[in-house]
Image (cartoon, grey):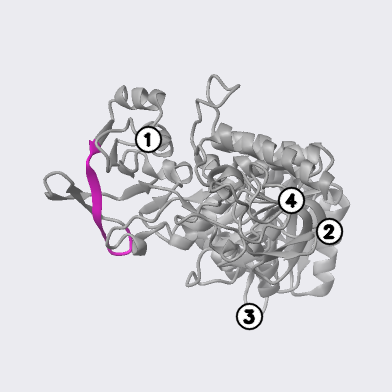
Amino acid sequence: MTQAAETARTVIMTVDDDPGVSRAVARDLRRRYGESYRIVRAESGESALDALRELKLRGDLVAVILADYRMPRMNGIEFLEQALDVYPGARRVLLTAYADTTAAIDAINVVDLDHYLLKPWDPPEEKLYPVLDDLLQAWRHSDHRPVPSTKVVGHRWSARSSEIREFLARNQVPYRWYSSDEPEGQRLLRAAGQDGQRLPLVVTPDGTPLVEPEAPQLAAHVGLATTPAADFYDLVVIGGGPAGLGAAVYGASEGLRTVLVERSATGGQAGQSSRIENYLGFPDGVSGAQLTDRARRQAAKFGAEILTAREVTALEVNGAARTVRFSDGSAVAAHSVILATGVSYRQLPAAGAEDLTGCGVFYGSALTEAPSCHGQDVYIVGGANSAGQAAMYLSRGAKSVTLLVRGPSLSASMSHYLIQQIEESPNISVRTGTVVEAAHGTGRLEQLTLRDLDSGREERVDAQWVFVFIGAAPLTDWLDGTVLRDERGFILAGPDLTADGRPPAGWELDRPPYHLETNVPGVFVAGDARAESAKRVASAVGEGAMAVMLVHRYLEQS
């Protein structure tokens, strides 16, 4: 931020209960500093504190506060003492009469007063401006300048606070985290009029305080699109993982009016990967967040709309239209739909784990929580690529990383290059044939009970961090009764629907379903949600592109 841009948002505040004096002070300040600073005046300590709290929430800067000593209800010293909690870096000046100089001198020790001015200060060129010039110069050279950003105040071991941080991080929204028991967190809570009983508090860059916000409300306030621009599209893509982003890029680039709907954050499980090293074209590897960000920007460049924090609850067939209904009752329709809902990590089937989720037990949030794991012992449950990538990433700062794998080895589900890296990492160990039997802790994870599958022997270990990457549960329950799925919930398409040589029940077209087409004409599936899919990023992107090609074929014949 340039100095000119900074000072445009910087405030000089004056507080005096005498309206005439208040206007005179503000007039003199505007004459000298009005082009570079905002001059804010108040006529009581209470109203001035309200103004300071509002400025704090908006992320504005306050350089100097001038307060009259003799004010009713709250004198200048009392006001400056409270203002110190809101803007500790602001320079503080007390306006006082000659008879009150003793009180002003005492205030130097009480509120760390920077200066006191005797009234009247005429002429200001001799008695006011030189003092303010020195104070402003000192302020500009101090460490006072917070970067305007989203601020999150919460409890370290709070599941809801963890969810908010994960949502912002995965949606590439910069934010700063403050614990509710640290001074800055407490200042933000007071500025928002909160006592800390309801957390987390999110303060948006424009200063709006959100208490315990739900994802749609939060998304709308941090600049993420949540509402479709139209009622009808050529293509609705449901899910923003690699398959969905691939479909959005190819759909929009080929002229289809395309909207992508994502319930949480684009990228899916791949977006949480610390480093993907076997994706074509990235010989040095690429993080899931980087790959996701590039794909999202690419889709937007071609004109695709991307909606975040919108949960789809139903798919309806209305003649030639395919209607997608949201959890709030609204809907959007299209000629065609691509289901790219992906999968989620299965919940850890261990006693106590559910109650400690977000409080030491985490699902796929290694990137967000990694800084807090520095120098700690970390456990990872799972033996596939996502678990291996998390282990390598966390091992950079953790004291030790232990992979807990149910199977006899990693080779059944993890890529060879990752296995080699893990074997070469001195602070990563692998315990095969081991499961988590229970998670223990009050308010946060403290211990794990591990069970050896071969011997049945149980062992309790100290643990504050466990990251779970087990199995894949498709997010398809909302399709029940509309789209055919297998016994595990994965979507059937193309050849899987016609394995016996006959079209699926209810199929009315004189052609068989296309390769990625479901039992509903015009509704396609791509990526991990499809039965027998490869469960790899490259194949998901390829299926997204292929699904768009089949959408074109469907539209041409409709």
Q: Viewer-nearest of labels 3 and 4?
A: 4
Of callouts 1 and 3, the N-terminal one = 3
Tag 2: amino acid: Ala
**Which residue carries the number 3 mark?**
73
Nearer the observer: mark 4 or 1; the answer is: 4
The residue that appears at 37% across and 48% down in the rendered structure is 468
Image point (76%, 41%), residue name: 251
In x, y percent, where is residue 337? 71, 52
Q: Evaluate whether residue 110 shows in this view.
A: no
Disc 3 residue crowd, few under 14, some 14–19, many 20+, Cα 10 Å:
few
Mark 2 sits on what residue? 230
Q: Which residue is mark 1?
A: 413
* 438 up-or-down from 461: above or below: below
Inter-mark Cα distance, 2 to 4: 32 Å
Judge whether 362 appears above or below 81 on screen.
Answer: above
Give amino acid for label 4.
Asp
Report the mark closest to the observer, 3 or 2.
2
Number of the label disc, if any, that sits on residue 510: 4
